[in-house]
Amino acid sequence: MYRKILVPVDLAHLDGLERSIDTATDLAKHYGASLHFVGITTTTPSEVAHTPEEYSRKLHEYAERQGAAHGLSASSIARTSHDPAVDLSHQLLEAIGDAGADLVVMASHVPGLADHVFASHGGAVAAHARVSVLLVR
Amino acid sequence: MSDQPESEGPTTPIETDYELGQDNIQPQIGPFGMDIHNPVFMISGLTIVAFVAFALLLPTTAGEMFGWLRPAVTSTFDWLFLLAANIFVLLALALIVTPLGKVRLGGRDARPDYSYAGWFAMLFAAGMGIGLMFFGVSEPISHFTTSLAETAGTPDSWAPLDGAAGDPEAARRLGMAATIFHWGLHPWAIYAIVALALGLFAYNKGLPLSMRSIFYPIFGERVWGWTGHVIDILAVFATLFGLATSLGIGAQQANAGLNFLFGLPVGDLSMVLLIVGITAIALVSVVAGLDAGVKRLSEINMVLAILLLLFVVIVGPTLAIVTGFFKNLLAYVEYLPALSNPFGREDANFSQGWTSFYWAWWISWSPFVGMFIARVSRGRTVREFMICVLLIPSLVSVFWMTAFGGTAIGLLDGGLQALADAPLELKLFTMLSELPLAGITSFVGIVLVIVFFVTSSDSGSLVIDTITAGGKIDAPVPQRVFWASFEGLVAIALLLGGGLAALQAAAVSTGLPFTLVLLLGCFGLVKGLMAEPRS
């Protein structure tokens, strides 16, 4: 039913992503789909990497580890953004289109008061993506 | 500095144990999650609140204290400001011609993030857009009239150098040269050096995008401790007070312009509404992000400014402006050595009251403008960077000043005394009203002023947010909303409490420690560039 599953990851906060990664790998095994880990970084140094190239390398290694651990085909898509705090969901939507993914599995927090003012990235992706989006809370 | 090996890769990162964000805390304030650098955010926030409270509760004491401090700083250390600015210009020019000009920000393989047009629009809007609107007419007029006056050349005169008493042609040349001097190579060199250093240490050395990173070659690991905290807090302080006072003064000026055009009453209510309005637009822009917000607004403003400039050139004295451009450029070059001489000056009013004040002001703005320029300049080579941040803006300033100031001097010399009599904030509109379609051009002028303030408030909030988040540019959006709103509130409080002048003095006074800091920064910059591969 699904062939390409896109999984947005935040390399700085991997501990909060366990549930969404587990969900994505289970679905990939079930449908025989490939996993595509997408990460957005800044051009300036961040807590994950000093340069976009280093970020890209780290994301690639992460995807390879995940693929090997679960016996799945996994690849990585690193994108840079001028202003990720604002631009993230837009970048993710572009990545979904570019990769030709047919399912997105993404971690999101339980909506709270602040979501009335600033929509969560997961919410924004779900609202605008043309493919199925599974938000893992 | 730790010795850096000859680089094999595209850049030469500095090895440090510091991890970006290690001093950050993530408190939950109400429904909003934050991500802030612990001492820097808290101390700069509290210091700012304390200063504003001081200026409001004890306006007389604050006024006296800072009223004394500003001239004391600019007249005692005038030689230091002038000397330092000359060093920045020489270093910036040297970087264009030496092999260091081949170093690329972000490494050999980096490609520019922005097109020339978008890049140039943003750095110009951040650097001086607003000032050109207000000083484009008023400053040439001031220097021209003081130079022409009988008293020119005496100690009481405010004329540059010896003035040119009774000789309108010489007074025009001197007045234009002095104005261009204040808006040409020197201010742009100050910005360019700070911006280049910030860009180099972030993109090539892998350190956080923050003022403290420039000083790593000098202070080593201590920049991550209190030495660095103090540098960053000073940068936040200078940026926020610079912005808040400009916002307050800008509201006064926009109010005067709207009164001139539409009869909007001049008063506290109008000005508070203007600040609220400008801050509200800035909030929308800041939430829209860098590309959809400040970049788009800067481009709109660039187009409007070019249209206004072309309009003045075409309907004004076209030939005089075109030949004036070259004459003024020559006059600038001719008077540059005398105007920039730091020692033995006999025109103390001018060299201390104008030049030294300007240099302190540009320097106190340099963390803000420098950070912003750095953020949009990845992928440029040092040579390309210096040509586009130093030479081209300086030439644009010469042309702008010629079109606005030269035309105004021509009108004044032709007998339009109203230009000399009009208050500072109305001189631009007085000149535009002599040209056709005055209603439209004055309106465009006011729109330009307001949008330039929006872009300043917007880019300033991004910069303060980055510094107070320890160099992260992806901190949660509510934080930059907080800083943009805070700027507006500080501006309103100071405007109503009468503390604007005091705080402007405080902001300028931060120019003094920063001058010393930036001279050290030049050393760090050259040392950092030497270790980079050239491509």
Image (spheres, coloured by chain):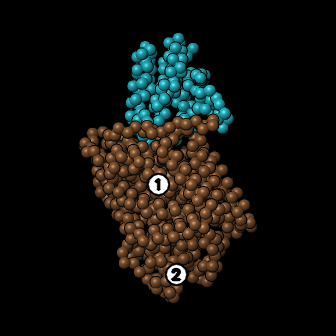
Give how far across and how far down residue B315 sits, in percent. 61, 70
Amino acid type at circle 2 is: Thr
On what subunit does the disc labeled 2 rest? B
Amino acid type at circle 1 is: Leu
Residue that extends furthest to the top in the rendered view of this protein: A30
Chain A as rendered: colour? cyan
Q: Earlier in the sequence, mark 2 or mark 1?
A: 2
Disc 1 crowd rating (10 Å Cα; few below 14, some 14-19, many 20+) is many
Foreground residue, B520 or B474? Answer: B520
Give how far across and how far down residue B147 sits, in percent. 50, 82
Query: Is A44 above or below relative to A17?
Result: below
Q: Is residue B512 left or right of residue A95?
A: left
Query: Is A73 above or below relative to B511?
Result: above
Rendering quarter of residue B391: bottom left
Q: Is residue B527 left or right of residue A108?
A: left
Q: Which chain is brown?
A: B
Residue at 42% in and 43% down: B208
Residue annotated with mark 2: B146
Residue annotated with mark 1: B234
On what subunit does the disc labeled 1 rest? B
Of tags 2 and 1, which is closer to the observer? 1
Residue at 34% in and 60% down: B91
Foreground residue, B135 or A95? Answer: B135
Query: Is B431 above or below relative to A83?
Result: below
Q: Is residue B425 left or right of residue B379?
A: right
Query: Is B505 above or below relative to B289?
Result: below
Q: Is residue A53 left or right of residue B458?
A: left
Q: Secondary structure at mark 1?
A: helix
